[in-house]
Image (cartoon, rainbow, N blue to C red):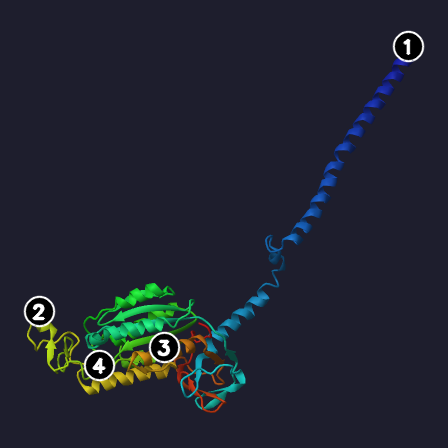
Amino acid sequence: MKRLLLAFVCMGILGLASYGQTDRATRPRVAPTPAQDAPALRNELPSTTDRRPPVLGGARTQAPSTPTPTVPEEDQIVKVETNLVTMPVSVLDRDGRFIGNLQQKDFKIFENGLEQKVDYFQSVEQPFTVVLMIDVSPSTAFRIDEIHEGAIAFVNQLRPNDKVMVIAFDERVRILSPATSNRQALRDAIYQAEFGDGTSLFDSVDRVLNQELANISGRKAVVMFTDGVDTTSRRANYQSTIADVEEADALFYPIRYGTEGTYARGGGGGGRVNDDDIVIDWTTIILGRPQQRRSRRGPAGTSQEEYEGGLRYLEALAQNSGGRKFEADSLSNLDAAFAGIAEELRRQYSLGYYPDKVGQLGERRRISVRVMRPSVIVKARSTYIFGQSDKVAGR
């Protein structure tokens, strides 16, 4: 009996030992699993970040270094926008041909008579945008066909990347074509320019400078076909538009059509003189109105003094912008002129400097550009307004 009890006790002890060993063997197999996974995850994160730092925010890990270049960069941009004075410059020989291959050392800039250091220089061919302004007032009506031909002759001088906007003006301003390089669309737009009533030349120049050109970047210019006489402008005048031209970064090339002598004296917008010097008032013939009636164009343009004033205005536009004025004596002359204009715009030099003396906002300063070569003609603006933020090269 004692032996039987002893056997049961031994079996119980063996069972308890076996149960304890089973419990200890189970836990070690479970515990190592997360212990091995955690190091694997830690090893993947650095390798992923190294492969794609721009996408996964590698820059964020360098947050202290990011603001460091940003602040000086912003300061630099403000400085250039505020103080750098740049201007397009054309250098021609005595025959009006563009002179290329000049270098920075060939130029000198003077502000209010004091020489400045040339800090910016560029001489590369670039496409440009031109605004064609076509005067369709009554005074130019009898030369409208010539104006059409002249405008198309200019378009024919352009290259594929050059763009043109076509604007017609009488007492109103009409955009016949937005800036485009589509030659056929430009020709169609030019032929849509038909004469109307009045001449709001000043208002038209104001619109082009402050609205149309403001939305155009790069090299830009205005080619005007007009006699220069204004009669119906209400918002702008001679002085205000010339001041705007001084502040703009566009060249003006007026093509003057002489209408004096052939425009009816006192007709004010409806008449012209035929070969027999007979005054024909078309408004009287067609509408049956009294011959004394004047159109809204008024008597302006009927006196030599008013035409001379128009001539002075066109010369001022060219001089203050750095462009040139041409007389539309014949289409052959215009072909040569347009070829020269296109070459000037495409191959201009661009110069810039930081003024030695800081001026007051809105202060007008005189500038002159000289080229250290004999027998050359330099075309550049003669004044600028200090503090203008748009006088930056290429803008």
**Of the two numbered discs 1 and 4 in the rendering, the one whose residue sits closer to the viewer:** 4
- In three-dimensional space, the C-alpha distance between marks 3 and 2, rounded to whole angstroms, equals 40 Å
Q: What kind of element bears circle 4?
A: loop
Left or right, residue 60 beside residue 289? right
Q: Position of residue 281 (x, y in %)?
A: 11, 76
For marks 1 and 2, the one nearer the N-term is: 1
Q: Are marks 3 and 4 in contact (CB under 8 Å)?
A: no
Element carrying mark 1: helix
- The residue shown at (63%, 57%) is 61
- Label 3 sits on residue: 338
Residue at the (9%, 69%) spot, across then down = 286
Residue 99 lies, with reference to residue 283, above or below; the image says below
Contact flag, marks 1 and 2 (Cβ < 8 Å): no
Earlier sequence position, callout 1 versus callout 4: 1
At label 2, the amino acid type is Leu
Residue 4: assigned label: 1
Amino acid type assigned to the residue bearing label 1 in the image: Leu
Compute the Cα span from label 3 to label 4.
21 Å
| Quadrant housing the N terminus | top right
The type of residue carrying mark 3 is Phe
Furthest-top residue in view?
1
Q: Residues within 10 Å of mark 1 (few under 14, many from 20)?
A: few
Mark sitting earlier along the chain (3/2)? 2
Instruction: Identify residue for label 4.
Output: 259
At a point 8% along the width and 69% down the height, the residue shown is: 287
Q: Which residue is mark 2?
A: 287
Front-lying residue, 158 or 46:
158
